[in-house]
Amino acid sequence: MEKETRFRNKITWFSTVFSVLVVWVHSVNGELFLGRTEAAEKVMAFEKILGSTIGQIAVPGFFMMSGYLFFRGFRWNRLGEKWNSRIRSVLVPFLLWNGIYYLGYVIGSRLPVVADIVAKGTVPFGWYTAVEAVLHYSYNYVFWYLYQLLLLILLAPVLYWILRRPAAGAAVLTVCFWGTLKGMTIPCLNLDALFYYSLAAFGGLHGRGLVERAWTMKRCVAGGGLVAAAAAILIARWPGGIGEGVVLRTLGPVGLWFMTDEFCLPVPKEWMKYNFYLYAIHFALVRLINKTAARYCPGYWPLPVILYLLMPAFMIAISTVTGKWLKNHMPRTWFLLNGGR
């Protein structure tokens, strides 16, 4: 297997793992089933081991992979090519899925049984609300990530102008990291997202040899040290402040990348190539399954834990079956919804 193929396979594997973690982040359900009780607190404490701790490396990992892939071998003459590909893979799905979620809530809020489960009242249907929903992901909360990613993609010329100079890039990364530690904010853009994305972009411009070098035991030990440091922060300080969070979310994905031997990773299965589609559909389905089960089986404490643990498997099965159907029977629609992936 050639080097580029191994690299792409590794990206797919990491995307799959991060997608599973994202599902767990949004699947916490103890209070839905058990109300505000001591039993619910125990269930949620267990679920948050994956959702609110380990799972928190997922979205930073996605930002890092996106930044690295955008700036990997980047030059000024590739800006148009990169922007055009991201219009297809990020902007078009962002607008389409936001519209689909909005229409889904409009319809669902007017269906008696579904409306009781959704519990959002009657969602207004009109041009202003529709435009707000499409542009600002009002009914598709998990697409805050794509919104931030679009802003970062628009900033590509500025980021490249700075990051292509190693000293200037290192200085800006230091400032972003310091600002994130101090809880500073800037208009529109999340400062921590800018840091994760820019750190990986810097690697794509200056560190391809380090990032893509073949696995060795030394790399594994170094990666293990980073993961151990992240685990130590998690155990000693969590829940801590934003400072502990950004360090954990940086060390975790980077350490895992260095630890993973790309030569031992099997060729990704077909279902592993539906990660974006899974990300797009999982939130509504997770909430629907949990709320429906809680409505008809309240108080059964083993059920929320069982559902929580199995939820990634449910989402993978649903995304694979429906994704294959769309791909085979509505290929143009699939192309648009999946961003050409």
Image (cartoon, rainbow, N blue to C red):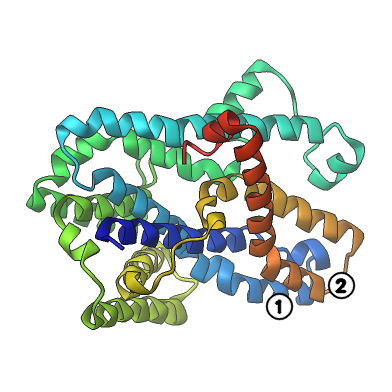
Res 64 quadrant in image? bottom left
Question: For this view, does 310 lie left or right of residue 85?
Answer: right
Q: Any mark on residue 300, and which?
A: 2
Figure check: 92 above or below 118? above
Res 240 quadrant in image? bottom left
Residue 221, percent across and down? 27, 83
**Secondary structure state at the residue bearing disc 2:** loop
Res 52 quadrant in image? bottom right
User: Residue at (75%, 72%) from the top-left corner?
Assistant: 306
User: Residue at (53%, 31%) from the top-left corner?
Assistant: 336
Residue 77, percent across and down? 16, 30
Residue 260 seen in render:
no
Please name the amino acid that badge 1 sits on: Lys
Q: Which residue is mark 1?
A: 42
Residue 201, percent across and down? 24, 50
User: Residue at (52%, 60%) from the top-left corner?
Assistant: 269
- Pick the front one: 68 or 109: 68
Residue 61, percent across and down? 40, 58
